[in-house]
Image (spheres, helix red, strand yellow):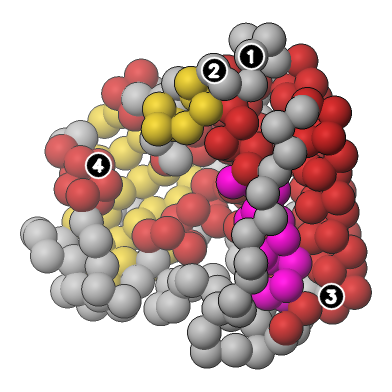
Amino acid sequence: MDKTTPGFTDLLRLIDDRATAFRAAIAAAPDLDAQVPTCPDWTLRDLAQHLGERRHFWAVTVAAGPADVPPTVEPTPAPREREALLAWLADAFQRFLDALRTVGPDRACWTWWGASESPRTTGAVARHQLQEMAVHTYDAQLTAGIPQPLPYEAALDGIDEFLSTCCATTSPWPHQPAQIDFHTPDGHTWRLILSARGAVVARPPLTAVLPAASVRAPAPDLVLALHGRIPLDTLELAGDSGYFDLLAEWEPED
């Protein structure tokens, strides 16, 4: 993990903060059947159903401990009435937090990521689920007409978490070897090294190599771009931006 990664207690605090912010967006939204601009196949009600169901799933998953396959969790339909939906969400978020607090950060459990650089532990689940909740809270706020920047502490770790979990792999990079740099204006840098051996995340000190492409943006904007919420070309790009398209299209086998 990068030195910017919050400790387990701080991860739980940030998850709780995003849970509260998500519920606030649901409470303030004029129409729960409004289409989510950043998830156009979903309404705001669908988004709430998704986030609540996944908290139940991950609560069961971290409580189950080491496993080679995900647990079977029966979906719980979300209530349609707003106050009942808010209570259902609060219960789902609390179950997830309680499960994490009970087992701590170091217990092995099933995860969907395999040969990435993220461990298959409850701490890594907390870290990734913070990012899912942060981005989906932005989705809900945008739909409700009250978008807010991602919390800086969560966003800064979100860059490293995305690269470590969603990009790092042992599957061969099917194109010309390349290095892509990711920068924030306050001095944080990551390098994704792509080769026939896969994708590896490098952190400072970095070798003096001119990357094939780079992007620079404040951490909250960079995370939203990595998750496809804002166009990458609205950020400061350098080099051959086509590498970002190749990276987005790449589907590693493992």
| 218 shown above or below 116 | above
Residue 219 is drawn in which quadrant? top right
Which comes sooner in the sequence, label 3 or label 2? 2
Residue type for callout 1? Asp
Q: Which residue position holds label 4?
A: 244
User: Tag 4: Cα neighbours inside 10 Å, few (<14), some, or many (≥20)?
Assistant: some
Q: Where is residue 66 in the image (x, y as percent from the top left)?
A: 65, 89
In magenta segment, residue 39: no
User: In the depicted view, which residue is nearer to us: 162 or 71?
Assistant: 71
Residue under the point 35% across and 25% down = 231
x 41%, y 78%: residue: 115
Disc number for residue 169: none
Residue linked to disc 3: 104
Q: Main secondary structure of the magenta part?
A: helix
- Give the foreground label among 4 and 2: 2
Q: How far apart are marks 4 and 2 (CA)?
A: 31 Å
State whether residue 69 is above or below residue 15.
below
- Three-letter amino acid code at the position of disc 3: Gly
The residue tagged 2 is 34
Residue stretch in magenta = 50-62
Q: Which is in the foreground here, disc 3 or disc 4?
A: 3
- Label 2: state its secondary structure: loop
